[in-house]
Amino acid sequence: MTQAAPSLRDRAGTFGLSTEEFDLLVSQIGREPNALEAAIVGAMWSEHCGYKNSRPLFRFFPTTGPQVLQGPGENAGVVDIGDGWGVAFKMESHNHPSAVEPVQGAATGVGGILRDIFAMGARPFAVLDSLRFGNPDSPRTRFLLNGVVEGIAHYGNAIGVPTVGGEVTFHPSYQENPLVNVMALGLLRHEDLAKGTMGQVGNTIVYVGSKTGRDGLGGAVFASADLSNASQADRPAVQVGDPFMEKLLLEATLEAIQAGVVAGVQDMGAAGLVSSTCEMAYRAELGITMNLDLVPTREDGMVPMELCLSESQERMILVPVPGKEQDLLDLLAKWELDVVTIGQVEAHHNYRLTWKGEVVCDLPVALLNEAPKYTREGVESGEIRAKRERDLSGVPVPGDLGAVLTDLLSHPTIASKRAIFERFDHQVMTNTVVVPGAADAAVMRVKGSGMGVAATSDCNPRFVYLDPYTGAAAAVAEAARNLACVGATPLAITDNLNFGNPHRPEVYYQLQQAVHGISDACRALNTPVTGGNVSLYNQYTEGDERVAIHPTPTIGMVGVLPDITKRATLNLKGEGQTLYLIGEHASSIGASQYLETVHGLEAGHVPPLDLTREQAVIDATLHLIRAGLTDTAHDTAEGGLAVALAEMAIAGNTGLNVTLDAPQETRADALLYGEANGRILIATTNPAGTEAALTARGVPFARLGTSGGDSVTIALPAHHVHLSVTVSALAHAFNTPLAEILG
Amino acid sequence: MKTAVIQFPGSNCDGDALHAARLLLDEGAQFVWHTEAGLPTGTELVFLPGGFSYGDHLRSGAVAARSPIMQAVKAHAERGGFVLGVCNGFQVLTESGLLPGALSRNRNLHFMCRPVHLRVENTSTAFTGAYARGQVIEVPIAHGEGNYYADPETVARLEGNGQVVFRYADNPNGSLNDIAGIVNERGNVLGMMPHPERAVEAPLGSEDGRGLFDSLARAGTPAQAPA
C-alpha cells in the first residue's frame, strides 16, 4: 500500500507558513505556488524578514527629526552630526545561532551588521555588543560566553573595526536563550549615502563576494521559532564567517560607492539572495529577473531552494549606475572578489527567477514584501503583576551594608568587563578617545573635525519584566544619561526587541507595552527611532515547561560631542574633588539588583520615570561638562548610588567620603542601593560654579562629599549607618569575577 | 621623510599608519598596493602596518611576505632605506627574512588589547634616537600572535649587538627575553608588536609613540642613518 505524498499545503509549516498563510498566498496569486515559491514566501514572511507580529506596533515610534538623514526601512538609519558628516548605525540580534554555535553565531552577527553599515556607504568605525547569559556558574554559560567572546574577537579584530562597548549581564531567564545583540556605527559624507534600491528599468544586478554554499539554510525561519533540544540538529542553519573576505568586500563596496558607480546596494543577510534582491526591487517599485544558473556556488548540484535561501556570509548585491557597469566590474576585480551579473531590472512588478531555462519563481514583489500583519491581544501575566505589587516593607535591612557593597560589585552583571574587552581590539582606527570601561559610553573622534561620536547600548531587563512600559522607557532614558555622562548630545536610537513567543498573550503584552514606552521616551528626549531589529521566539520548551527570556528591548543610542576636548569619564581625578548627585535620592528598593542579589526577590515597582526631569538632568550635565565645570560623570544604574560611587573610586584609584542626608523614613538600603531614574553623579574642583549652574537651571541636586583617602566611606546620619570599605578591597571584588568566568 | 605605507588585502592598521606618518613625518605619505612591483621614487621609509594580511592564512604574515611589493621592500632595505613593521608588519618582516625569529601565539592563547610599558633599550638606532636609554614608554598592544621566539644563538646575537630595541616591562605574551621590538644588524629595519602609531596624540591616551617618529625625522634621509 502506498501513501500519497503530503500536499504542499500540508507541508506549509516546514516553510514557516501557517495553513491560513498558505491559503492567503494561493488566493493572492490565483494558483498553487510551487515548493520554491512557498519557501521564498515563508522566508520573506518570517518574523525576521517580514516583522508580521511587530510591524503593526512600529507606527507608534517617532522616526523623524531634523537630525535624521535616513529613518527606518533601509539597511541602517543615518543621523546628521554636522560638518557634512553622517553616522549610520543599527543593532541586530544573532541570538538563535549563538545559542547553538556561539563562536560562529557571534562572529557572523558582527559580520552581518557591518555589511548593513557599509551598504549605506559608511565606513564602520565602532561595534558594541549587548550580551546576556544565564547563570554565570553553569558550564553552559561559560561555554556560551567564551564562544561568543571568541567569535566577536575573531571577526571584529580581524576586520579592523574597534569593539568599543556594550553590556554583559547574567540572569537565569537567558540560560537556554542567550542574547547576542550587535550594534555597529559607520561614518559617511552626506553625498556618499547609498540606498538599497534596484534603481531603474534596464539596470543590471551584480552579485559580489563569497560563493553560495549550503550553510545557513533557512536561517530566517530558524530564528523565528522556539528553541528546543532538537535545535542542535539545526547547526547547518548557522553560517560560518570569513572576516578576511568581508574586509575585501567592505573596501571594494566603499570604493565603488565613492567612485559614483553604484546606484543601489544591499547585503545578503537573513534569507540571503532572495530578501536582498526582493527588498531592493520593492523599494524601486519594479520587477526583476535573475538567472540562478549564474550564482557562484561552493559545491556542485545546488538546487534553486538552496541558491535562494542560503545565508552564506560576505555577499552583497550591487546595482551599477547605467553606463558604469564595466567600471564597477573592473574596480571589484582589483579586490579579487567573485563578481557576476546575475539579472536585470524590468518594467513589470514580479520577482522572477530562472533555472536551467525554466521560470522557477514568478511572484509579485509587493506580495513578498508585504507580509500579513498580526495585531494580537496582549494580556498581562497575573504572576508578574503580583510580583510588581508585592509589599516590600517586610524585607529586612541587612546589618552589614558594607558587605552588600562588595557583594554587588562582584555580581557578574555589575563587575568589571575588562577581561572581556581586552580580548577585543578597541583602538584600531585610532579614534577611540573614551575606551571601554572608562565611562558610561564610548567616544570616537571624527578625525579632522574636532567632533566626537558617542554610543551606548542599554536595557535593564528586570525593569522591563516587572513593568514593560516604564522599563522600556527607562532603557531609553538610561542610554541618554549615559551619553550625557561623556558629554554627548543624544541624537537617535536603534532598538533590538528581544522577546519570547508573541503568540502567548502575556509576551505580546510585553512587546506592545515596551514599544509604547520606547516611543514616549524617544519623543520626550528627542531621539527618534531610525531602525532596529526584532527577535521573537526567545523561548525554550522542555517537556511542558516554556521558559521565555526576560523581555529585553535593547536600546542603542548615538550622540555627538561638538568638541571632544569637552568630555567626561567616570573615574575620580585625584583628591579634593567635590561630589554631587544631580537628581534625587532613591526612595525604594523595588526592582533593584540589590533586592535580587541579596534577598532573592525580583519584585516591586520599577522606580518612577519623569521624562521632563530626565531631560533637565541631561541638559544640566552637558552644561557642566561643556562649561568646563566637570570632567567626571557617572550614571547610577544597577546597584544604585553606592555602587556608582564605588565604581568612580575604583576607576580613579582614589577614595571618597560622602554623607547622604535623607530622612529616616527612607530605608537605608534604598538610599544606598535603590535604582532611581533621573540621577547622575558628578565630581568637580569648582563647587561654587557647579552649584550656581545647577541652581540656575532649577535641577535638584545634593552635595555629597569629597574625593580622597583610600576608602569609600558613606555615612547616613539619620539612620546611624556608616560604612567604609577600602578601595583595594572594592577593586578586588569588582575586577575578579569575569576573569574567573572566562577562565 | 617620504613614506610609503604598504597595503595588503586584510591590512587594517594601514589608515592609522598613514595618519601617523602624515602627522609626524610626511604630509604626502601614500599607500602602495601589494601588487605593485616598485616603491614610489624617493621613498625613504616603508611602513608595514598591522592587520590580518590575507586573513592570517597559512601563518600570520606568510602570504604577504611573498607578495610582489616585498621584493621592492627587500631591495629598499638592502640599500639602507628605513623599514618599520608594526604588529602584522613585524610578522611580515620575520616571514620575509628581513628580521630573524618568529612570532607565535600569545602564552595565554588569547588576543590582547591593552596599554603596555616598554623599556627603550637602545637609543642609537634611527628609530629611537629621541628617547632616553632606559626610558619607559606606554604604547598599546593588540595582537594574538606576538610571542617572540628565536633560537638561542640568534637571541644571544640580538642581545650582543644591541638589536633588542624595546623590551616589555611586564611581559604580556611570553616573548623570549621580554622582546617587544628588534632591529636588523644594520639598524635600518625595525619590527615591533606594540603600536606606536596608536600613541601619537593625547586624546588617544598616550603620546609616547611620538618619539619613534621624531627619531626618524631627526635621523634624516636613510643615507645619513647609522650603518
Image (cartoon, coloured by chain):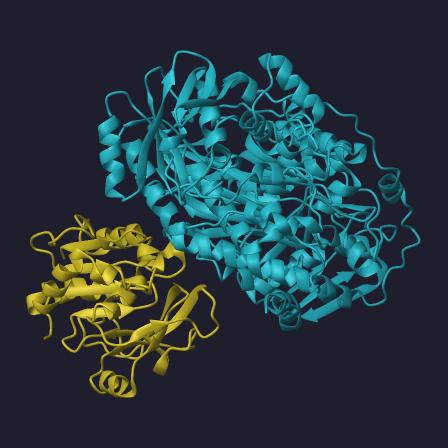
Colour assignment, chain B = yellow
Residue A567 visible? The answer is: no
The location of residue A312, given as percent across then percent down, is: 46, 43
Vertical arrangement, residue A618 with respect to residue A51, above or below = below
- The quadrant in which the C terminus of chain B is found is bottom left
The location of residue A391, given as percent across then percent down, is: 91, 46
Left or right: A266 with respect to B77? Answer: right
Please identify the quarter of the rendering in which residue A646 is found. Answer: bottom right
Say which residue appears at 43% left-offset and 77% top-offset.
Answer: B170
Please identify the quarter of the rendering in which residue A38 is found. Answer: top right
Residue A450 visible? The answer is: yes
The location of residue A441, given as percent across then percent down, is: 54, 48
Vertical arrangement, residue A454 with respect to residue A140, above or below = above
Say which residue appears at 38% left-offset and 15% top-offset.
Answer: A346
Left or right: A51 with respect to A596? Answer: left
- The quadrant in which the N terminus of chain B is found is bottom left
Left or right: A518 with respect to B164? Answer: right
